[in-house]
Image: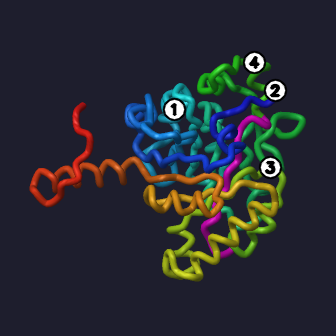
């Protein structure tokens, strides 16, 4: 039977599933953020391990997946491109889900191995008889709490993992209803920066917002989840309140830089809003 990952459990809940972007290849950074109490009634249920634009590559996957999974949070790996060998590496290292960038049409899904399960199939990554990817999950179960190697993992993986496609191009928006209708895609995530650039419009302008709302509507109409990358807590709160199911609150480097520079301002007498301090 399928196992229930933290991100899947959160997506079944009444409120948005919060997560953040990890761009540094550091298990210590990830665990520093997610270990212990959040001081909030909310907690992170997923971390996007960014191997597309971050400094992360596949030899970091195993350590990061296990560090994140051990804290009851789902590691979602964004691979650089929807290529079979890239997705295999992420899955065999224990990713709870795969995100592929730049999904331009429903044909894209059938042309590339997107579904993050055990093997490749015309509709994604599934084990035989549904797909063809080679079998070798020696390390994949390690990041799943309570999931034993062997049948426990193998029987649950095809339905227990989560498939994300990123909609961030003009053609992706034009074809979004067809993309959302494809069986095997679980979540449509909006990349707002690339979306604005690809559309040739101002980010947060009317045309940009109309495209965002069209993607969200298409996802929900097809019974799928809608997700969006946000630039901070205020942005994330607004998007969660308007009905997005999955929302990123920031990036690791964004928070590190802004927090440290703010402390510099406090030290220089330019600000009085200091953080908690200490080690």
Nearer the observer: mark 1 or 3; the answer is: 1
Q: Residue at x 54, y 67 (%)?
A: 192
Q: By what rule are the colours in the image chosen?
A: rainbow
Disc sitting over residue 68 in the figure = 1
Q: Are marks 1 and 2 in contact (CB under 8 Å)?
A: no
Question: What SS does tag 2 mark?
Answer: helix
1 or 4: mark nearer the eye: 1
Q: Is residue 92 left or right of residue 277?
A: right
How far apart marks 4 and 2 lie (CA) works out to 8 Å
Q: Residue at x 56, y 41 (%)?
A: 46
Tell which of 14 and 74 is nearer to you: 14
Residue 223 percent location from the top left of the image? 80, 56
Q: Where residue 185 sits in the image (x, y, percent)?
A: 76, 52
Q: CA separation, marks 4 and 3?
A: 23 Å
Residue at the farthest right position = 129
Other-residue count near label 4 (Cα within 10 Å), few / some / many at <14 / 14–19 / ≥20: few
Give the Cα distance between marks 1 and 3.
Answer: 25 Å
Between disc 4 and disc 3, the foreground one is: 3
Disc 4: which residue: 150
User: What residue would you read off at disc 3?
Assistant: 184
For disc 2, the marked residue is 155
What range of the chain is rendered magenta?
158-171
For mark 1, give the secondary structure.
helix
Task: State which quarter of the image contains the N terminus.
Answer: top right
Which residue corresponds to the image point at 86% horizontal and 34% vertical from the top-left? 128
* Picture disc at residue 131: none
């Amino acid at each position: 039977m399928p196992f229930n990952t933290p991100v899947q459990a959160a997506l079944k809940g009444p409120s948005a599933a919060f997560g953040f972007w990890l761009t540094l290849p550091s298990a210590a950074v990830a665990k520093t953020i997610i270990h212990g109490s959040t001081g909030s009634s909310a907690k992170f249920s997923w971390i996007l391990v960014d191997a597309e634009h971050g400094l992360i590559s596949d030899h970091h996957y195993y350590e990061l997946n296990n560090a994140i999974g051990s804290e009851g949070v789902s590691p979602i790996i964004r691979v650089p491109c929807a290529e079979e060998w890239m997705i295999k590496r992420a899955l065999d290292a224990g990713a709870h889900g795969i995100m592929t960038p730049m999904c331009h049409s429903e044909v894209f899904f059938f042309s590339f191995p997107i579904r993050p399960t055990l093997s490749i199939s015309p509709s994604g990554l599934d084990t035989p008889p549904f797909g063809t990817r080679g079998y070798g999950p020696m390390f994949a179960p390690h990041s799943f709490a309570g999931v034993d190697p062997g049948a426990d993992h193998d029987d649950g993986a095809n339905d227990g993992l989560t498939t994300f496609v990123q909609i961030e191009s003009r053609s992706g928006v034009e074809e979004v209803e067809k993309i959302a209708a494809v069986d095997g895609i679980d979540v449509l995530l909006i990349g707002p920066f690339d979306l604005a650039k690809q559309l040739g419009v101002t980010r947060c302008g009317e045309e940009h917002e109309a495209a965002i709302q069209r993607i969200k509507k298409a996802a929900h109409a097809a019974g799928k989840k809608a997700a969006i990358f946000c630039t901070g807590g205020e942005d994330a709160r607004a998007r969660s309140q308007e009905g997005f199911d999955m929302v990123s609150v920031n990036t690791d480097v964004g928070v590190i830089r802004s927090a440290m520079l703010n402390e510099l301002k406090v030290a220089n007498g330019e600000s009085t809003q200091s953080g908690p301090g200490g080690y």
